[in-house]
Image (tube, rainbow, N blue to C red):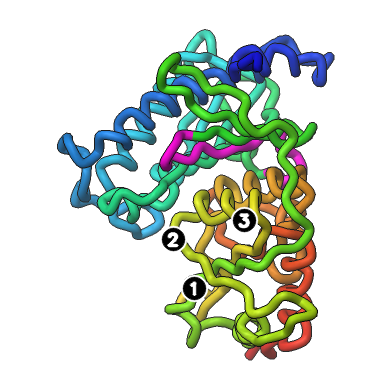
Amino acid sequence: MKVKTLGQFIIEKQTDFPYAKGELSRLLRDIGIAAKIVNREVSKAGLVEILGETGETNVQGEKVKKLDVFANEQFIAAFKAGGEVCAIASEENDDIIPIDTEISKNAKYVIAMDPLDGSSNIDVNVSVGTIFSIYRRTSLSGPGTLADFMQRGTEQVAAGYIIYGSSCMLVYTTGKGVYGFTLDPSIGEFCLSHPNMRTPQNGNVYSINEGNYLHFPDGVKKFIKYCQEEDKATNRPFSSRYIGSGVADIHRNLITGGVYIYPTTTKSPKGKLRLLYECNPLAFILEQAGGKASDGNKRIMEIDLKELHQRTPLFIGSSEMVDKAIEFMVKYKTEEV
């Protein structure tokens, strides 16, 4: 069997974008290179002084892990060196990072990322990941601006994630299907392992942090009970699988079928996940694979972005399971006070 590397595949796919001149291809290759470096550090995290917390808190109010900082720095360095983006938005940075260099200031693209999703799992050797989203800039020239990021998810040019698990895998879409590449450590290359990924229309797995059950909306509570009921016609009860790393949970459900839910709670009335660099890219991937993504009321990629770190609830996965969860949300909609 002929092995096809990420670099070869990207070059082949350039014909999908006749107006492009190779910048997006180079940007995707830059992401692949940074992912290899981060994977190397993740895989030896227990051996070197990179575990634990820095003692700082990020813009989200979360304690910053050392590996979060390392991953953030690696990806930023790769994007600055590559010259294909004029600005970067990261979960770890309060504001955007405009790039004012000769090679970057007139670049066509901006990139938003969560450099290390699920980082609370690092210290216990559980899968973590990186999520990225690429947009065409809206400003005409010079370093990128905040306005370049204030676009709906429907405007994404490309999106993807890297999962650092039992193997390192990069999954991405440019709106022409979803493709997965697994890192072959013997040759140091991402190789095409999952061509044209499709998610099942239905599944028997639901992923949600049930420890917050008391704080969930009624529709989510009713949906959980529906999943737990016995019914042979619909193969219920469903299995509950929750890793606590969004990339890992959604990656599993993408392949095997299922729904991942991170709803509003009484403690997080606007939801917890970020629209720009978590929900929109994951929604793009799932929709391209035949799945769905909603905030419980509206398609994720049609939500207007008003602020950089805007939060939203998320229902994502197999289309029939997402539809069923939304059905419960509509039926048991809690009246707003």
Tally the numbered discs: 3
* Circles 1, 2 touching at the beta carbon (< 8 Å): no
- What residue is shown at x 51% (from left), y 37% (from top)? 162
Could you say where residue 196 lies in the image, as x and y percent from the top left? 74, 34
| Image quarter (top left, top right, bottom left or bottom right) of the N terminus | top right
Mark 1 surroundings within 10 Å by alpha-carbon count, few (fewer than 14), some (14 through 19), many (20 or more): some
The Cα–Cα distance between marks 1 and 2, rounded to whole angstroms, is: 17 Å
Residue under pointer 1:
268
- What residue is shown at x 75% (from left), y 63% (from top)? 202
Residue under pointer 2:
244
- Three-letter amino acid code at disc 1? Ser
Residue 309 is inside the magenta segment? no
What segment is highlighted magenta in the picture? 151-168
Q: Check disc 1 and report its element: helix, strand or loop.
A: loop
Indicate which label's residue lies in the foreground, 2 or 3.
Answer: 3
- Tell me which numbered mark, 2 or 3, is placed earlier along the sequence: 2
Residue under pointer 3:
253
